[in-house]
Every structure is written in C-alpha cells, then in structure tokens.
Image (spheres, rainbow, N blue to C red):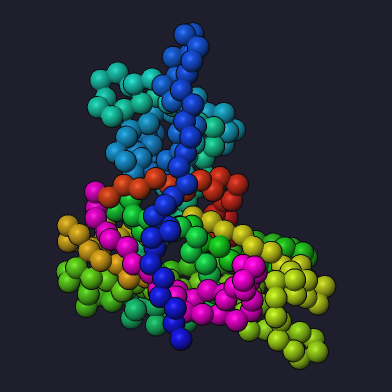
Amino acid sequence: MARKTRFIAFALLAAVSFVFASCKKDNTLMYGNLTMGNFVGDKFISDQGNEFTIVENTTGQDFIGIKRAIMQCDVLNKTEGVENGYDVRVAYLSEVLTKAPITLEDAAADPEKTINDPITIDYAWVAGGYLNLYVVFEIQYSPKLEDRKHMVNLLYSPAEVGTGKYTLTLRHNAYGETLAGKETEEGGKLEDQTQIQSTDMIQWGLTGGYVSFQLSDIITESEAELSINWVEHVTDTQNNWLTEVISKSGTLTYNKTNFEQVPLKLTTKTAPLK
C-alpha cells in the first residue's frame, strides 16, 4: 500500500553558517554564501534575485555553457550602480541538471521515460520558478560502470494546467543499475543493505545529485498545490535500504516568487543524472 509522506522535513533545509569579517583590513561582506541560480550572460542570478558578478574564480573551472548551478562564494562588495548586485569570489560551483516537465502522453511514447526504478528524495523545495530536488539512488561502483548516467523525468497531466492543483510523478530509469527486487545466486531475496553492498562480487553504493524542473513553463497560476509521487526502497529500523520498493507521495506549495535556501550537499555532484 502506498505510504503518504509530507515534505515538512524537507522544508527544514540545512542552514548555511556565515562568518562575517572581523578584521578591519578585510572588507568582505559575507563568507561561504551558498546559493542556486542561473547564468544569464556572464552574470549569475540567484533564485533569491541577487545578481552576482564573478570577479574571482578559485575553482579552476570554466563556467562557459552552464545554465543552472549551485554556487558557494564570498560576497566581496556591492556592485556599484546595480540594485541587488554583488561582486563575488567563487569557491565552489557545480552544474545542476535542468529539465522541463513532460506530459504523460509524451512519456508514454518513449518507454525509457516511463521506467519506475526506486529513487529517494532527500530534499524538495520551490525557488526561482523551479521544483528543486536532491535525489539519492544506488549505483555499481566496483567494477565501475563508465559513463553511465541515470535518467530522471517529471511527468504531469496537461488537463490539470490552470486548476491550481498538479499531480507530478518523478520517474527514474537506472538502465538496469539497480538491485530492486533482484535475488541472490541461490535464488533467495536480498534482505539487507549488507547484501546490497556486495552481491556476486559487485560492490554497490549510493550517490545523489541535484535536479531542477522548470515549473514556471507550465504553471500560470500565482499559487498552486503540488502532489509528488515516486517509488523508493523500503528501509529497516536501522535505515538500511532493502530491495523491496514502496510508492510514496508528498506535497508542496508552488509560487513563482517562492525562495527557499538550497540544502548543503556540496560533496555530491549531479554527474550520474541526465
């Protein structure tokens, strides 16, 4: 039976601690600012509406071609003549997968987009006109499968557009890289995370990443109620993942002007997703 879960816990996103300058010679306004947003030309526009001009880049990365990203930076000073504009020093930046929701009809026409492999939503929040998710799923890490990305999609019904209520379905295609429902060589069911981690000489682990779905393209109302459905692994009392799966759902409120702080997950990038 489906288990219904509200996103109350998800809204309690990890707060970022800011260290303010104490030395008179250091005019930095804020250290360790964590934000998500989009590149518009050479400017980074945060979901909160701030315009960041990158004057120092300590990452060694080239940001050309990146649309949406999570960025940690030091805010150096106010940009002269720009309302809500700041000059920043970038310490970390990771591209965020950005996708448009797809209709149920379009998904049905492409079997790859209807696969329903388990995936866990660690965080869900609305900001910048996007439904932003941090998702966790299993991968084979030894022997490593090179260049394999899992697919995620968000499905919706066009019939609900304009009604103020949307039922959204998150679908995950692991392309076979999942142990959900699989059995041991002896034919028995895999029962616990220990078996998930080492089966038939294959080592399994968990990874995760950010993905943003642009809801502002389909939601025209000033406010809407979102109901999100997905399938994830059952966990035991010690929070170990089992191979059994369960249907889950949660609710959020959408507003184009919503802003919620991004959760702190800097150690994980979005490379495994497409």
Residue at horizontal 38 percent and vertical 60 percent from the top: 8
Residue 100 percent coordinates (x, y): 36, 62
Q: Residue furthest bottom?
A: 187
Kindly report the secondary structure that dominates the magenta region of the rendered protein.
strand
Can you say whether 167 is above or below 36 in the image? below
Residue at horizontal 25 percent and vertical 66 percent from the top: 225
- Magenta stretch, residue numbers: 229-257
Which residue is more in the foreground, 45 or 266? 266
Residue 59 percent coordinates (x, y): 58, 33
Residue at horizontal 17 percent and vertical 57 percent from the top: 222
Which image quarter: residue 245? bottom right
Q: Quick check: is 22 in the magenta stretch?
A: no
Q: How many numbered marks appear?
A: 0
Which image quarter: residue 193? bottom right
Q: Left or right of 97: which side holds 8? A: left
Q: Is residue 141 visible?
A: yes
Can you say whether 184 is above or below 96 in the image? below
Which residue is more in the foreground, 266 or 106? 266
Which residue is more in the foreground, 30 or 154? 30
Residue at horizontal 49 percent and vertical 26 percent from the top: 19
Which image quarter: residue 229? bottom left
Q: Quick check: is 231 in the magenta stretch?
A: yes
Q: Left or right of 178: which side holds 130? A: left
Q: Is residue 73 visible?
A: no
